[in-house]
Structure formats: structure tokens, C-alpha cells
Image: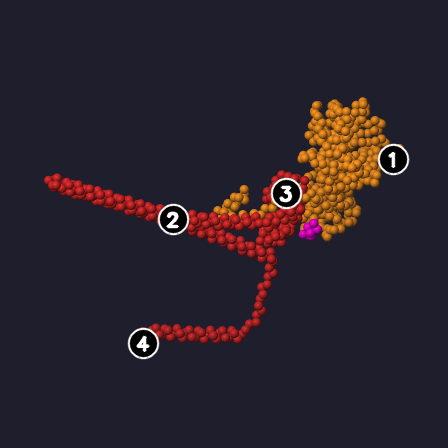
Chain colours: A orange, B red
Amino acid sequence: MHKLFSCLAVLVLTWACPFTHASEFVVEVTKGQTEAIPIAVVPFASAELTAASFDVAQLVSDDLARSGRFKTMDRKDMIEQPHTGANIGFDDWRRLNNDYMVVGSMQADGPDRYSITYELYNVLTKQRLLGFQISSNRAGLRSAGHQIADAVFEKILGIRGAFSTRIAYISVLGHLPDKTYQLIVADADGENPHVVMQSREPLMSPSWSPDGSSLAYVSFEQRLPTMYVQTLKTGDRRVVSAQAGVNQAPSWSPDGKKLALVLSTRDGNLDIYVKDLTTQQLSRITDDPGIDTEPQWSKDGQSIYFTSDRAGGPQIYKVGIRPGDKPRRLTFQGSYNARPRISPDESQLAFVTQENGDYRIATMDLRGRGDVQVLTKGHFDVSPSYAPNGAVLIYASRDKGRGVLALVSADGRVQQRLVSSEGELQEPAWAPF
Amino acid sequence: MPGFVREHSWPIVLSVVLHGALAAALLAATLISVNHSLPTMQPIPVDAVVVDSQVLHAAQRALTERAEQEAARVRAAADAKAAADAAAAQAAADAQMAAAKQQAAEEAKSAAAEVERTKQAEAARASSEAQKVAAAKRAEDAKRAEDAKRAEDAKRAEDAQRAAEAKQADDAKHAADLKAKAEREAELKRQLAEEEHVSAVEASPARAQYIARLAARIQNAWIKPPSARAGLDCIVNITQIPGGEVTSAHVSQCNGDAAARQSIENAVYRASPLPAPPDPALFERNLVIHFHPDE
């Protein structure tokens, strides 16, 4: 409209509009790429200081690479190592195909005091996008690095980074009859593991409360399955369900006031129930002779996704929590689809699917035509769980006969093993922000 | 002596002037020969400037633009002159018509006065020659009829003249209108021809090919952030220099978030240098890139 007016003005003044019209050269771009964005994270400090403290820049680089959204530059390919924007030769870095770069410096301010200054630059436009200073002790340098990675991730992609979040998982150590089960909480990159609960009997199904303060899980320490909620900070825990038969697969409602869980009747039939954590009131959600299990709340807290074999093999269904609501089947492709998990914006459903005898992580588009994409290529990839920003999923896999944790980007482009300590790792659950 | 001078003043002046001229010529010749006898061996300064082809192109382009602007200016002047001519013709026609009207009015007035005068004379004659009334009546009647006829004739002639004048004025106006119309049509035709030329270039396969190449290049360079989905609609105005290097990119209107805008700006720079047109004449310095992903 504006253009039209200026064109008219030009027309009135000089009768020259046909010329400006001729220069309107419009190129339509309707497709783009989903490839990783190239970025260089230049070391922040001298080799000596890094050795004495911690390599923050490397952690930032690793975080970004692990997200699948970034392609980080190898240090040995860096022609120079600037620490401030003023020293960046943008044209050189651009020639090395970097779109962005992070530069910074770290100083030792005292015996256990460090300050990190960092900046994020757009190499193509030469614009400075971020510039911050973080102060930390030696122990906090790791989380300082995750913070920097989060800020960079969000600035470039427009979605929150999840590098400062945590994961929970079950680790099984030793062999029968000397097995130990541990419930572990670690940083999102698998570092910094802490044992939250340990037992000689099986531990299962850790589930985060929406505020990240507590974990619900199932323990066989009383020989019978019992469901607990444990507060992480204090270690306090309480029994939330100890019915006769099974008590399994807890899932917190979005408001944190209810738990969906699976209970069994006397004849062993499994159904989905909801337990109000304040009133202890129990309401039955499904009533079917088949097995109904692995509930997961919808974002609005009005429905529950679950697995059921009511049609023969396991498939995924969704049911409203109001009495009388009829379950609706969601998966139709293949004979085995189980363990539904929704992405934080509920645009995607992740689940385990069977493909040529292998178990793999797949996603289904919940907004469009219900397209299914198989993300992983392993033989036994199970227990998917979304990062709170929806960009990545963590899942349990097997590597040379050992249970390991792995990550896959929500579009399946990048897959990565998570470094882990010893033990058989199972049932990862990504914590909320 | 004074008589001699007075008698031969011209030849004397001539001779003085000629002598003066001769002396001046001799002096000049001497000076020039002196100068020639001292040849200066100054080096010839070569003002060599490496002209960047891009600068040259820019200069040429500026020249072309100036020529275009000049042409536009000349055209505007011609248009203004045509309009002025038409206005002048109209004014002349109007003046002529006013003059004709005035003349007709005056003639009518004088005719009326004549009639009045005749009437008065006849009345006087009637009073003094009352006895001749019967005898004169026929003659008088005849005369009155004749007068009436004459007045009628005069009026008819006057009407005819007025009509002729009106027609003439009308014709002049019509001619002016025709001329103006012809000029407008010529201008329209010229504009049409220009537009036809532009659309011929726009419709040419080479141009379409160029645009397709640019689109492919930029699509390959665009890494979409999560927010860049169907519904995003952004316009980027970019400037390239010959050789395809992008020198500026500005997102002018965009319904996306900061990440989407940045990715779009980056896409253009990542695509730099842009592909060359199949025909150098198709090179466009300023391009408009319209980003609207279909998924």
C-alpha cells in the first residue's frame, strides 16, 4: 500500500512510474531447510586456566551439538581465537561457513571465584546478539555453561533451551542374586548423577511432578508393587497407591493435583484410574476387558492418552476423563504402538512402534494428517520422553547388550548416545523447566 | 593642417590602426619565437585510475538513470507545452466569440436607432401633411413594408453572421480538442509500448529462469527455525552488486518472530553471491524476496 502511494507520488511528480515498476523483481521462496545451523564456540580461557578449572566453552559447544539444531565447529579448524567482538575477523569466519559465533573470556577472580564474559554474534550480519557476564565458583561452572547454551539456543531459534534441566532414570547394577536398583537424577547431559533412591528390589516408572519438585515411582521393596511420591529436596516420601494387584505407570496431571495410574481388578484386568492427591478419591477412567496402561495426560488436563490391546495388539487411544467418554483410537499403522508421550505443545505424539521385529521411537503429527515418522534405527529403542522444549527426546536403548540412554531430535535428524556411568539404564524421564 | 586632417580623417585613422596592428603582430611573433626556442621537457602526467568494473557499471547505470530522468523531464515539459497550447487555443476561441457577440449587439442597437429615427420623421411628415395622408398612405405602406423587409434582412444577415462566427469558434475549439486528444493518445500509446516492452522482458523465459535460479539458491540457504511454518509471510528487500554479492538485506514486513526474521536475513547472506542472470541485461540491483513457506 505504502509502495503504491509512493509510486503515485512519483507518477504525479515526474511521470516516471513505469521505470520504478520495471525494477520490481520479486523472488518467491516457499521452501527452506531443516539442517543444523553452523556455529563456532571459541575457547574462553587459556589452556592453563581451563585445565585448572573447567572448559566452559567446550560444554556450551557440546550442548548445542547435542540438541541436533547446531553444527559446531571443531577447535582445530579455528584460524584464530578471539575473546571479544572487536577482535573477530567476520569475513574469515564467514568463509569458514559459520553463521554464528560465541566468544568469551574467563578470569579467576579469587581462590574459588571465576567470572565469565561472553558474547554471541551473527557472523553474516556482524550483529552482536548477546553479551553477558556470569560469576561462579568452580562447582557452578558447569551450570554456567548450560545457562550460556540455553541463552544462545533461545536467541537463535526462538525456543527455550533445555540444557539446564534434569533427567531421571533407573539404573540396575550387578547380577542376580546381587542386583541393586537405583533411581537417579542427573543433568540433561547425563553428568552430575545423584542417587535419589536405592533398593534391592525393582524400581520402575519414574514420573516428574509438573513443578519438578517431586518424583512419583513404583517400588517393589515391600515385595508388592507400591507407588510413592518423593520430594527431591528433602528426600521425604509417601505412599500414594498400594492396592492389591498392580499399582503402576503414574502420570501427573498438568496442575499437579492428580495422578493417573493403572490398577488391576481381582481377575487381573488392568484399567486406567485417576487419583486426586488431595482428597485421595479414585475415579475409574477405562473399563475394558483388555489391558489399558501407560497413561499420559493431555495438555489441558481433560483427556488421557493410553495404550490398550482391546483391538488385539497394543495401540494408542485417547479418552476424556469425564464419566461416559468413549476412547478414540489414534494409531493404525503397524501391529504394535505403545507408550504414548505428548510433546509439550501437544503437536506431536511420541511412542514405541515395532518395525520388522525391532522396537523404535516414532512420532505422529497430532495437528495435521497424522503423519507417522520413525525416528530411531536401533533394535530395542523404548521409553521415549520429551525435553520440556520439545526439541529432543530421550529414550532407552541397547548398546552391545547394555542398557543405555540416547537422544534423538524431534525431527529424527540427530541421534546421540548419552554418556553414562556403569549399569543398565532404563526408563528415562525428562524433567520440566 | 586641420583642414587636411578633417578632409582625410578616415584614411588617417585606418593607417594608425594598421600600424598598431602590425606592431602588435611583430611583438607577438617575437614572443612566440622566444617561447619556441625554450622547449620545456615536462613529463606527461598520466592520470591512471584503476576502474573497478563494478564502479564502471554503477557509473553507467547512474548515466542511464540520468538519461531516463532527463527523458522523463523532457516528456513532462512537452506535456506541459501541449496543455498550454490547448489552453491558449481555447482562450483565443473564447475571445473571438466574445468579440462577435459584442459586434452583433452593437449592430442590433444601431438598427433599432435607425428604425426609431424613421418613425419620428414619418410622424412629423404625417402631422404637417395630414391632407396628403390618403394619397401618401399607399406609398407609406409600401415604404414601411420595405423598411420592415430591410430590417428583417438586416436581422437575418446578422443572425447568419453570428452563426458563422459561432461555428468558426466552435471549429477552433473542436480543433484544439482534437489536437489535445491526439496528444493524449500518443502519450498513452507510448506508455503502452513501454509497458509492453517491460512485460515482454518480464515474460521472457530468461527472466523466469533467472528468478527460478535465485529462488532455488535462497531456498537452499534458508535454515528454517521452528517458528517458520506455513502462514509465515515476510518480505526482504536486498541489494546486490554485479557479481551477485549481497550488500544489504532488510526485512521490510514480516509476521514472524525475531528468530524467523533473522533466519530470513541470514538466508540471503548465505546465498551470496547470488547466481548471475542468463542474460546480463536482466541483472537487477534491487530484489524483493518474498518468504512464505508452504509447510
| Chain under numbered label 2 | B
Q: Is residue A297 visible to the viewer in this orientation of the structure?
A: no
| Chain under numbered label 1 | A
What amino acid is found at the position of numbered circle 2 in the picture?
A: Ala
| Chain under numbered label 4 | B
Is residue B115 found left or right of B266 in the rendered image? left
Instruction: Measure the C-alpha gap from mark 4 to mark 1.
Output: 154 Å
> Which label sits in the foreground, 2 or 3?
2
Of the numbered discs 2 and 4, the one sitting upstream in the chain is: 4
What amino acid is found at the position of numbered circle 4 in the picture?
A: Phe
Position in image of residue A328 (x %, y %) = 71, 28
Q: Which residue is mark 3?
A: A30
Q: Which residue is mark 2?
A: B175
User: What is the secondary structure assignment of the residue under circle 3?
Assistant: loop
Q: Residue at x 67, y 42 (%)?
A: B225
> Which label sits in the foreground, 2 or 1?
2
What amino acid is found at the position of numbered circle 1 in the picture?
A: His
Q: Is residue A93 magenta?
A: yes
Instruction: Measure the C-alpha gap from mark 4 to mark 3.
Output: 106 Å
- The answer to whether marks 4 and 1 mark residues whose Cβ atoms lie closer than 8 Å is no
